[in-house]
Amino acid sequence: DAGITQSPRHKVTETGTPVTLRCHQTENHRYMYWYRQDPGHGLRLIHYSYGVKDTDKGEVSDGYSVSRSKTEDFLLTLESATSSQTSVYFCAISESRQGSDTQYFGPGTRLTVL
Amino acid sequence: AQSVTQLGSHVSVSEGALVLLRCNYSSSVPPYLFWYVQYPNQGLQLLLKYTTGATLVKGINGFEAEFKKSETSFHLTKPSAHMSDAAEYFCAVSRSSGNTPLVFGKGTRLSVIA
């Protein structure tokens, strides 16, 4: 257990509304990631963070922004939600175990945009 | 750029039969390779990983995978399938540092028939 929680776990919202998803970790990990999972696509990287206020874009970053003002929280914001952003969102952290770094995932947030 | 191809979006095996899930990768640098499992409505759980050293990697639940550089493959096997192995399996690759974001395959759903 890498001590990752995501909130909310489920959300239904309407097109055009802003949405913020929260990832919280308790073990002071430096690296954090947001992925989305869609059928037939596996998981794809949205944004990631390599420290407080240090973030970078991933493969599918359009329409998303992130913020990391403290180590334990990594927020993903959909500025104006669209139906194409209906997905399951996973947060991950990178932890060093057995001499190498490995990513561990949170339980996910299921977002439906109507 | 890195990429992962998982052959077969759905594999069905009988209980007690060999499980073989195929993964081929593309990477311009020495890769880190991972297999994750996802049970219905859950997050991703690490099965096993290859970083350096021994090319045959053993993971949890009786799974193992062999890194074959010449074939750019990292196939997942289990000698005898159990009903509890039914899940979706994802192969992923990252650059030499495990802190870099993962690139996932599209996943293979494993069904186990009694």
Image: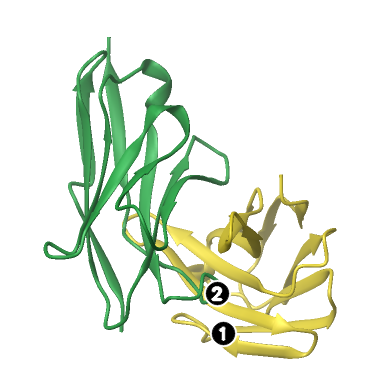
Q: Which amino acid does label 1 sit on?
A: Gly
Front residue of B52/A17: it is: B52
- Toward the left, the furthest residue is B71
Question: Which shade is chain B?
Answer: green
Which tag, 2 or 1, sits closer to the chain's start? 1
Counting from the top left corner in percent of width and height, residue B46 is at 51, 46
- Chain of the residue under the numbered disc 1 shown in the image: A
Residue B108: name its quadrant. top left
Task: Tell me the number on the disc at residue A63.
Answer: 1
Which chain is the one coloured yellow?
Answer: A
Residue A73: percent from left, percent from top? 82, 70
* Mark 1 crowdedness (10 Å alpha carbons): few <14, some 14-19, many ≥20: few
Q: Mark 2 points at which residue?
A: A82
Q: Hey, what amino acid is under mark 2?
A: Thr
Secondary structure under the numbered disc 1 in the rendered image: loop
**Is A111 on the left-hand or right-hand side of B76?**
right
> Which residue appears at 69% of the width and 55% of the height?
A11
Asked if residue B54 is positioned above or below residue A64 in the image, the reply reads above
Are the residues tagged 2 and 1 within 8 Å (C-beta)?
yes
Q: Which residue is depicted at the point 42% across and 62% down?
A: B51
Looking at this view, name the residue that lies furthest to the front.
B53
Q: Dot 2: what SS?
A: loop
Relative placement, left or right, of B64 versus B101 is left
Q: Is residue A8 among the parts visible in the rendering?
A: yes
Q: Quadrant of residue B34?
A: bottom left
Say which of marks 2 and 1 sits in front: 1
